[in-house]
Amino acid sequence: MFLDFFKKQGANILTFSNMILGLVAIVVAIQINYQLSGLLIIIAALTDRFDGMFARKFNTTSVIGKYLDSNSDLISFGVAPGLLIYLSILKEFGMVGIIVSFLFIIAGAFRLARYNAVEFTGFYVGVPITIAGAVLALSVFIIPYIPAIVFIFITLLLSYLMVSNHSIKKV
């Protein structure tokens, strides 16, 4: 009985785990524990990696699952890293830091909307938000070693790559 439930709901459990990790990463960032927040985002990326694989393996893919995954991804790889990079370093730049952080989140939302609107052909158009969010989260670990201004460029570059038309083969 439990095994049947897990086969049917396992992908959703992983998707909600991704979302919860992203929400906790936001809370932890607000509490000024930036490294833990970054780590939680990386763990969320792992759960995101496996939810689709699980759904395909047990033939439980659904339109609702696709949109739940996108909503979770926006929280975990858009809002959480955007807030994390702002609180940890970009707040030093005042309004510019806010705008750059918001651009990252908006670019991620656009990237997810575009992904949901087109038929997947085995190639991503633009860098997936999971990768961009994980890279931004990891960048928190190098803050002590790099000038603050570099993080504006990292965030803007990742934002651009998400909305670009570069094709990337799914591995």
Image (tube, rainbow, N blue to C red):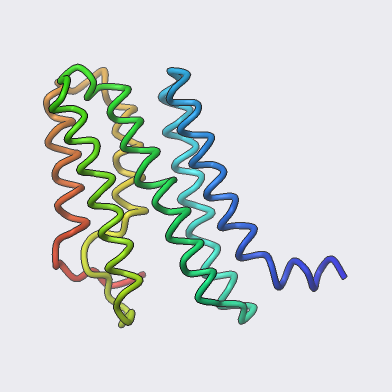
35 vs 81, nearest the viewer? 81
Report whether 129 appears left or right of 90: right
Would you place residue 138 above or below residue 18 in this image?
A: above
Report whether 88 appears left or right of 145: right
Provide residue 68's location: percent of width, then percent of height: 51, 62
Split into 4 quadrants, where in the image is the C terminus?
bottom left
Q: How many marks?
A: 0
For the point 15% across and 67% down, which residue is it?
A: 166
Provide residue 16's location: percent of width, then percent of height: 59, 53
Would you place residue 119 above or below residue 99 in this image?
A: below
For the point 61% across and 81% down, which residue is it?
A: 59
31 vs 46, nearest the viewer? 31
5 vs 38, nearest the viewer? 5
For the point 34% across and 36% down, which residue is it?
A: 138
Provide residue 163's location: percent of width, then percent of height: 18, 59
Residue 82 image-quadrant placement: top left
Provide residue 88's location: percent of width, then percent of height: 31, 22
Split into 4 quadrants, where in the image is the N terminus?
bottom right
For the point 42% across and 53% down, which residue is it?
A: 73
Farthest residue, direction right: 1
